[in-house]
Amino acid sequence: MFIEFLLLSAELTIIKYTPMSGFETIDIIVFVAYIMLIVGIGLWVSRDKDGHQKNAEDYFLAGKSLPWWAIGASLIAANISAEQIIGMSGSGFAVGLAIATYEWMAAITLLIVGKFLPIFIEKKLYTIPEFVEQRFNTTLKTILAVFWIALFVFVNLTTVIFLGAKALDTIFGVGDGSLIWASLIGLALIAAAYSIYGGLSAVAWTDVVQVVLLVLGGLVTTFIALDQVTPDGGVLRGINHIYDVAGDKFHMILDRDNPEFNNLPGIAVLVGGMWVANLYYWGFNQYIIQRTLAAKSLEESQKGIVFAAFLKLIIPLIVVIPGIVAYVMFSQPEGTNTIPGVVEAFTKAGGGLDNDKAVPLVN
């Protein structure tokens, strides 16, 4: 969760971003101050308490002390990572609001998962593999644990760090990849500085800060983008304009003749296998469900689930709409504000479009 907020802290200081504009002094100050704030909070909340020696429950379950609002915020923080902010905005550019199907289905899934939480809470579990061991055997637990470690290291973490680094390469540099390796290493070291030392307590409480910034910063980004999409300005005027010139981007169910149909196959998404993936992700995914296991009580845990479901309803406004705005700015239909360099920024050197630059360049 930390990586995407390095990007967000930069975006909050940019009123009109154009490619190759670089950071000003105030941008760098905000950026560095944000890093110091998050690392400081993480280290402070996970410090040794007088008269208490840290144990496994403190590290893995934050001492079972999390209130509902911290659980809900941390669930969203664990879910909304760099690959979603950048990738889903890119999908908004290419597909439109239909990609929000994943988000709104997740809100329903969270409510279903909340009904099954007593099974996990009453067993006083630390991890999902521990539940598998109790339900089946140690061999299956080991297989699942090894699979998850490989999945998180070689898929989740690498994707999150790479896309975060790609965003920083675009904002700090010119998007040519020259800063990718420095950004990769820097992001990994900064995130590890507090999360490895402090465990879930450090992660969960910094998540609260970051979700507040995600929602507020995302709304600011969306409003600024809508305000700038027309020459005359105005958020309402911007909404009307993008709907008029890119109405097909607001279709929730894609037709078979849509070029993105194979990626989002119409009604099949709503009634098909996506439910299986959602129930796994929100109900049995270790780094997600672990937040609910750290609740003060079952009631607090279930309240946290409901709060997370509410937050999932507003994520499309924060993530997808800026991608649609970026599409309109790129395609330049009549009545759209012309921003120098936008078309070139989305065009790859060898041809084709780079949708993943929707968030860094939308302002």
Image (tube, rainbow, N blue to C red):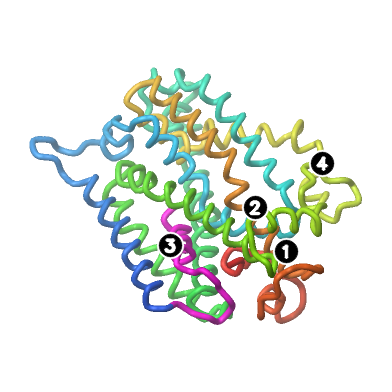
Neighbour tally class for label 4: few under 14, some 14-19, many 20 plus, Cα within 10 Å: some
Q: Is mark 1 on a helix, strand or loop?
A: helix
Query: Can you give x and y, in whole percent of width and height, for residue 8 in the image?
Result: 47, 60
Magenta region: which residues?
1-23
Is the residue under label 2 in contact with that under label 4 (CB below 8 Å)? no
Q: Is residue 56 above or below residue 163?
A: above
Work out how far the residue at label 3 is from the one at label 4, CA to CA, in angstroms: 36 Å
Q: Nearer the viewer, residue 196 or 28?
A: 28
The residue at 55%/30% (across/down) is 110
| On-image quarter of the C terminus | bottom right
The residue at 50%/63% (across/down) is 164
Neighbour tally class for label 2: few under 14, some 14-19, many 20 plus, Cα within 10 Å: many
**Which residue is situated farthest in the left direction here?**
51
Q: Nearer the viewer, residue 107 or 242?
A: 242
Q: Earlier in the sequence, mark 3 or mark 4?
A: 3
Q: Name the residue under label 4.
A: 266
Q: What element carries label 3?
A: helix
Q: Which of marks 1 and 2 is nearer the N terminus?
A: 2
Work out how far the residue at label 1 is from the one at label 4, CA to CA, in angstroms: 21 Å
Q: What element carries label 2?
A: helix
Q: Earlier in the sequence, mark 1 or mark 4?
A: 4
Q: Name the residue under label 2.
A: 320
Residue 120's mark? Answer: none
Q: In the picture provided, is 58 more to the left or to the right than 94?
A: left
Q: What element carries label 4?
A: loop
- Amino acid type, residue under disc 2 in the picture: Val
Q: Mark 1 points at which residue?
A: 327
- Amino acid type, residue under disc 3 in the picture: Ser
